[in-house]
């Protein structure tokens, strides 16, 4: 799957679990870390864990394989799902507001996501 496709499929799965504030940024040429970052929020730890599980299951089902790494499932405050060229962040709202990842790349173009 292409990076944009992974972000779009992740958004579909996150939307099914009532994720809020979904956004995806095209970071090609702006970051060496990844090509695309998808960010979404949940209200509590239970919801963020459900969102992360739904994303990894859906992407695997669509042929995107397993993530390289998943961090933060223990607490659920900030879950990072790394697909190599795509990094997906699932935040609780207060952590998302504090870290404000979107502000790190003001020149990044937004990718249109379903349900966003």
Image (cartoon, rainbow, N blue to C red):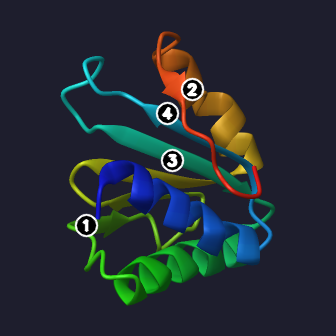
Mark pair 1, 3: CA separation: 15 Å
Neighbourhood count class around disc 3 (C-alpha, 10 Å): few under 14, some 14–19, many 20 upward: many
> Label 3 vs label 2: CA separation?
10 Å
Q: Position of residue 34 (x, y in %)?
A: 26, 39
How many other residues sit within 10 Å of disc 1, few (<14), some (14-19) or many (≥20)? few
Q: Earlier in the sequence, mark 3 or mark 2?
A: 3
The vertical placement of 80 against 106, above or below, is below
State the image quarter where residue 32 is shown. Answer: top left
Q: Residue shown at 81%/62% (left/top)?
A: 43
Secondary structure under badge 3? strand
Numbered tag placed on residue 25 in the rendering: 4
CB contact under 8 Å: marks 4 and 3: yes
Calculate the distance from the C-alpha at mark 4 to the C-alpha at mark 3. 6 Å
Instruction: Give the total of numbered labels.
Output: 4
Q: How far is disc 1 from disc 4 in space, using C-alphas?
A: 20 Å
Q: CB of mark 1 within 8 Å of CB of mark 4? A: no
Circles 4 and 2: CB distance less than 8 Å?
Answer: yes
Residue that appears at 73% across and 77% down:
16
Q: Which residue is mark 1?
A: 69
Residue at x 77%, y 57% (from the top left corner)? 115
At label 2, counting other C-alpha atoms closer than 10 Å, the crowd grade (few under 14, some 14-19, many 20 or more) is: some
Q: Nearer the viewer, residue 58 or 67?
A: 58
The residue mark sitting in front, 4 or 2, is 4
Q: Considering the numbered disc 4 on the image, is that residue within a helix, a strand or a loop?
A: strand
Give the numbered dot on residue 102.
Answer: 2
Q: Nearer the viewer, mark 1 or mark 4?
A: 4
Residue identified by numbered label 3: 38
Label 1: element kind? strand
Residue drawn at x 70%, y 54% as measured from the top left: 41
Which label lies toward us, 1 or 3? 3
């Amino acid at each position: 799957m292409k990076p944009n496709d992974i972000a779009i499929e992740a958004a579909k799965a996150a939307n099914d679990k009532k994720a809020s504030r979904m956004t995806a940024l095209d970071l090609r040429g702006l970051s060496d870390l990844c090509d695309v970052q998808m960010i979404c929020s949940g209200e509590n730890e239970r919801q963020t864990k459900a969102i992360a599980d739904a994303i990894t299951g859906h992407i695997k089902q669509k042929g995107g394989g397993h993530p390289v790494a998943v961090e933060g499932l223990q607490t659920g405050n900030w879950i990072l799902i790394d697909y190599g060229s795509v990094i997906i962040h699932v935040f609780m709202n207060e952590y998302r507001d504090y870290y404000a990842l979107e502000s790190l790349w003001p020149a990044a173009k937004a990718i249109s996501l379903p349900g966003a």
